Amino acid sequence: MRCMGRSTPSTRQALDMIISGMEEMKKVMRTGDAEILEELVRLGKQHAAEISYAGIDVQLGFLLAMILEVAKRTSMPGDRTG
């Protein structure tokens, strides 16, 4: 993907590409699983700035962000805010 004078996509562009692939995945998933995937994507997107700042692989950062948010929900069930 060529991105406005860059040889590599920005973090946001890379996330959009990853999410686009997940949208294709959702088409063949059971409804309940697709809804969970949508929520995971939403949770992961919250940390785009941190992923960009860290300079780590976007896919790894996105996965870590999703895991972080799920861990927060399971360790602090009453607290759904950041």
Image (tube, rainbow, N blue to C red):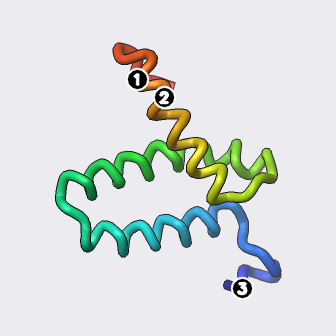
Residue at 34% over, 53% down: 38
Residue at 41% over, 47% down: 40
Please tell me whether mark 3 sits on a helix, a strand or a loop: loop
Q: CA distance from mark 3 to mark 1?
A: 40 Å
Q: Which residue is mark 2?
A: 71
Residue 5 falls in image quadrant: bottom right
Q: Is residue 51 left or right of residue 41?
A: right
Residue at 19% over, 52% down: 32
Please tell me whether mark 2 sits on a helix, a strand or a loop: helix
Which one is nearer the viewer's eye here, 26 or 6? 26
Please tell me whether mark 1 sits on a helix, a strand or a loop: helix
Q: Which residue is mark 3?
A: 2
- Name the disc covering residue 57, or none: none
Q: Is residue 45 left or right of residue 29?
A: right
Q: Which residue is mark 1?
A: 74
Q: Nearer the viewer, mark 3 or mark 2?
A: 2
Please name the amino acid that badge 1 sits on. Thr
Q: Is residue 60 above or below residue 77?
A: below
Dot 2 and dot 1 residues touching (CB under 8 Å):
yes
